[in-house]
Image (cartoon, grey):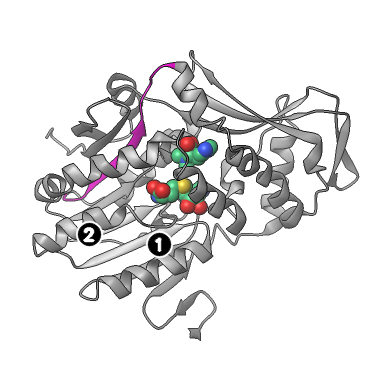
């Protein structure tokens, strides 16, 4: 493997590194600390995804209660040819690509239509990114694969430019963004998209509370481990000393916000050192919010697109209306 300051080239694929992902750790530490010092302390959900957390997410996707992954997979299988025809895609760009399995459904459709040329994967987890990029390069030798280790909130610039590209953001990961992040993110996607590009977004839909809450409170306890992993990641990356076993996993649906909230609740008094002589004390019952997972309706999604420069051009759901794939396109000057 050759290696330069910012770019590594492995045997099969080029991997680049986003600047913001590797930005000054002191800046990130200050952000983490600021979020923990809020009235309701918060940890950004990107901190779930070290290698252990990414493996736990893969386990979650197989759980009987977690309907999202298998539903989206079946849905993508049934719409892939249509989406590729509608968008004329020659290049696929996946944001938050993870293990990179579902992307194959679209790559296969592009291959069937003789238009498979390029693929770019962007994820914050380098191990998963590297493995999935190399697997794809192996399995689709006619396609050029590039990987970007980065944060999709900051590093979209590294995706580069292109023509007839289909961006995809699967799993409902867009629902993990807070409303302000959501709007900023979509505007920066809009700025990255060319006029002939499209964006396919996976959305978990509003449904009965029991089904939603079961998906985040699985009986095997995998989601609880995934949730607690955020504390382990902070301990490793920022030298905090959270007592992981002092916290319990909590997940509930907030019908007003239409999102699942995951929290960690102190089961006994505990404290954590945040550096610079700052200590955060928890009494029993105090909570940290670790994730929101927003659930959409077609209406709420169209509303949320307002002002982002993107508009809905296709809406696909499974027969049970559990999950949706929304196709959006840039609003073109002078109307579309
Ligand atoms: N697309 C895959 C994985 C979804 S899990 C699927 O459909 O199953 C969410 C993915 O987003 C993880 O791989 C995680 O590492 C990545 N991720 C989370 N926050 C991120 C961020 N801020 N920037 C880039 N990737 C992020
Ligand atoms: C990645 N994301 C869409 C998942 C979700 O359902 O919000 C993360 C997750 N959190 C708990 N279980 C899975």
**Which mark, by number, is residue 100?**
none
**Badge 2: few (under 14), some or many (20 or more) residues near its Cα, within 10 Å?**
many
Q: Residue at x 69, y 36 (%)?
A: 35
Q: Residue at x 54, y 54 (%)?
A: 55
Report if residue 63 is visible in the image.
Answer: yes
Of the image marks 1 and 2, the number of the one nearer the N terminus: 2
Report if residue 153 is visible in the image.
Answer: no
Q: Secondary structure at mark 1?
A: helix
111 and 70: which is toward the camera: 70
The magenta span reads 196-208
Residue ID for mark 1: 158
Residue 152 lies, in percent from the top left, at 45, 50
200 and 57: which is toward the camera: 57
Q: Residue 190 in magenta?
A: no
Q: Residue 199 in magenta?
A: yes
Q: Residue at x 21, y 46 (%)?
A: 77
Residue ID for mark 2: 107
Residue 327 shown left or right of residue 98 in the figure: left
68 and 278: which is toward the camera: 68
Looking at this view, name the residue that lies furthest to the right. Answer: 277
Query: Which of label 1 and label 2 is nearer to you?
Result: 2
Residue 115 lies, in percent from the top left, at 12, 63
């Amino acid at each position: 493997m050759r290696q330069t300051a910012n770019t590594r080239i492995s045997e099969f694929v080029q991997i680049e590194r986003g600047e913001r992902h590797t930005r000054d750790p002191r800046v990130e530490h200050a952000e983490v600390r600021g979020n923990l010092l809020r009235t309701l302390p918060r940890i950004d959900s990107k901190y779930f995804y070290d290698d252990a957390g990414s493996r736990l997410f893969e386990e979650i996707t197989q759980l009987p209660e977690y309907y999202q992954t298998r539903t989206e997979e079946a849905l993508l299988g049934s719409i892939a040819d249509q989406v590729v025809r509608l968008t004329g895609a020659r290049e696929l760009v996946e944001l938050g690509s993870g293990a990179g399995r579902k992307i194959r459904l679209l790559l296969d459709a592009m291959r069937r239509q003789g238009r498979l040329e390029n693929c770019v994967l962007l994820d914050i987890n380098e191990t998963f990114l590297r493995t999935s990029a190399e697997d794809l390069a192996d399995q689709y030798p006619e396609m050029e694969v590039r990987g970007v280790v980065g944060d999709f909130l900051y590093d979209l610039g590294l995706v580069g430019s292109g023509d007839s590209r289909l961006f995809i953001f699967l799993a409902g990961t867009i629902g993990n963004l807070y409303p302000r992040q959501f709007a900023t993110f979509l505007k920066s996607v809009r700025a990255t998209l060319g006029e002939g590009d499209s964006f396919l977004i996976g959305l978990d839909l509003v449904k009965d509370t029991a089904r939603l809450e079961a998906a985040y409170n699985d009986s095997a306890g995998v989601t609880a481990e995934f949730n607690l992993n955020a504390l382990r990641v902070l301990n490793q990356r920022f030298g905090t000393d959270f007592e992981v076993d002092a916290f319990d996993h909590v997940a509930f649906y907030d019908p007003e916000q239409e999102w699942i909230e995951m929290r960690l609740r102190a089961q006994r008094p505990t404290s954590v050192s945040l550096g610079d002589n700052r200590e955060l004390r928890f009494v029993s019952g105090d909570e940290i919010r670790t994730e929101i997972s927003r659930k959409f309706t077609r209406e709420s999604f169209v509303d949320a697109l307002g002002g982002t420069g993107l508009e809905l051009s296709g809406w696909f759901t499974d027969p049970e209306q559990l999950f949706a794939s929304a196709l959006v396109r840039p609003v073109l000057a002078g109307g579309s």
